[in-house]
Amino acid sequence: MKGEKNGSKEKLIDILQNVLQTDIDLGFLAALKKTEIETLVACVRNRVEHPPR
């Protein structure tokens, strides 16, 4: 099960790199707690769905 969590985090990191269009190493995000990841995803989703004008 722990490997599945790491795989999910890696997938999230890949998605974020794609959304941000960056090659910067975002591996540090793998150290985030579940609640922190949920907050980050909510913020990114909000920005993508409602870009600044």
Image (cartoon, rainbow, N blue to C red):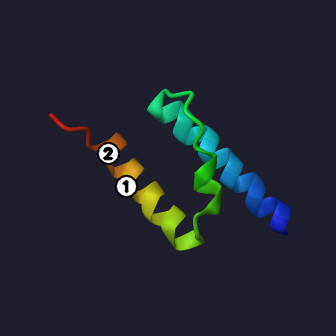
Question: Which amino acid, by three-letter code, is at mark 2?
Answer: Arg
Crowding at dot 2, Cα within 10 Å, few <14 / some 14-19 / many 20+, comes out as few
State the residue at coordinates (48%, 34%). 19
Q: Nearer the viewer, residue 21 or 51?
A: 21
Q: How many marks?
A: 2
Q: In this view, does 18 lie to the left or right of 51?
A: right
Question: Which amino acid, by three-letter code, is at mark 1?
Answer: Cys
Q: Is residue 19 above or below residue 6?
A: above
Q: Is residue 33 left or right of residue 52?
A: right
Q: In this view, does 53 lie to the left or right of 40?
A: left
**Which corner quadrant of the image does residue 23 belong to?**
top right
State the residue at coordinates (58%, 70%). 34
Task: Determine which residue is flagged by label 2.
Answer: 47
Q: Is residue 20 above or below residue 37?
A: above
Whether label 2 touches label 1, CB < 8 Å: yes
- Give the CA distance from mark 2 to mark 1: 6 Å
Q: Is residue 1 left or right of residue 38?
A: right
Q: Where does the image place residue 22, in percent across and percent down from the top left? A: 51, 28
Task: Determine which residue is flagged by label 1.
Answer: 43
Q: Is residue 20 above or below residue 3?
A: above
| Badge number at residue 13 | none
Q: Where does the image place residue 30, in percent across and percent down from the top left? A: 65, 56
Q: Quadrant of the N terminus?
A: bottom right
State the residue at coordinates (77%, 53%). 7
* SS at circle 1: helix
* SS at circle 2: helix
